[in-house]
Amino acid sequence: MAEVNLEIAASASIHLVCAFLAMEPPQVLISLARVCGDGSIAPAVQKFIWDHCLSKDGLKSHGPYMKSFLKKLIAEVEVEGIDVLDELYEHLALYMTSIKDVHLEKGDKRVLKQVSFIFPDDYYKSPIFEESRKLVVPLQCSVNMLEGDTGCSIWPASLYLSEFIISFPEIFSGKSCFEVGSGVGLVGICLAHVNASTVMLSDGDLSTLANLKLNLELNKHIIRTDSVRCIHVPWESANANDLKENRPDIILGADVIYNPECLPHLVRVLGCLLNREKSSSTVQSRPVAYIASVIRNIDTFNLFLVLVKEAKLSIEDITEKGSKPMNLLPYMHSYDRSSLRLFTITMDITSC
């Protein structure tokens, strides 16, 4: 039994650090800390948090997040009647008095999060890979996706689609890929990781595009080549001929089915990217789109289905058809996979 507990604690320790770097809600960190301490946030667990999260981070982390986490951590330890590590009190005092939410005073609305994919032991038996089993993706993101900065947030569907890409690398390796609504760039970086031949990332918002380019620079250790590019593509004004010139093998989109006013433009863009001349297209060579989405409003989703049919496209829900990705983000308790659906979209074969 002791060996099992040690194994669980070791895994929880890794998850705790990953959750901290990803800025998971403080309660998630507390829960993982309890697993590390077999139900208690013992002094040894507090020391681990200090050594592997707080002391290394210094003052670089987002002030309000750090204060919230430290307050919660100290309160939980005090309730248990356990001595609180002096460094935790001192660090909280520093955030409470010295910096005074310096991030907010400067008007900073972005933070640096790290998304760490944790692979099973046999993952790299795939001949596609020769690297280590680590994939850590730093991303500059907005503080709050509800504050109008949605393009710079990490949405659940982008996490799901990224897990799908890494779980099934053979689908994307050596293929040209085009993402619509690329946001912070997580999906594109994962495509580069699995050796897609070219990756074109697009977004219609210039501020989001600038942030996307910054994130590509932050992840040049993963990308390593000039195979990843990003372009400005507002769906409502995208030129059909320009889109067709890209001729991607695979089109991707994460959480793009949410605004009914944008759906006609999105479907037109998808149709242009999926359409190829009859003479140069076989069933095997036809492009395919992978769209991951949370269905937040059934009327909006039904409108999307109607528009897809009118555009002579075929859509299939493959979520339950052997296409579920591995759980590569087990520490992200705030990420609800059960709400995600994955669809493929192709040109209707009867119209080709």
Image (cartoon, helix red, strand yellow):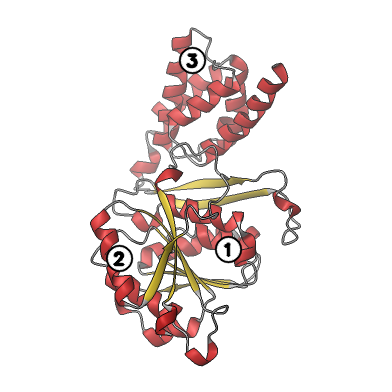
284 left or right of 153 in image: right
Compared across the picture, whether 7 is left or right of 317 comes to right
The label shown at residue 77 is 3
Residue 304 numbered mark, or none: 2
- Residue located at (45% from left, 45% from top): 337
Q: Earlier in the sequence, mark 3 or mark 2?
A: 3
In the displayed structure, 160 sits above or below 2; it is below
State which quarter of the image contains the N terminus: top right
Marking on residue 5: none
How far apart are the two marked residues, 2 and 1, measured between alpha carbons?
26 Å
Q: Amino acid at mark 3?
A: Val
Looking at the image, is mark 1 or mark 3 earlier in the sequence? 3
Which quadrant of the view contains residue 181? Answer: bottom left
Q: Identify the secondary structure beneath mark 1.
A: helix
Q: Residue 141 location in percent, x, y? A: 43, 51
Label drawn at residue 191: 1
At label 2, which amino acid type do we have? Phe
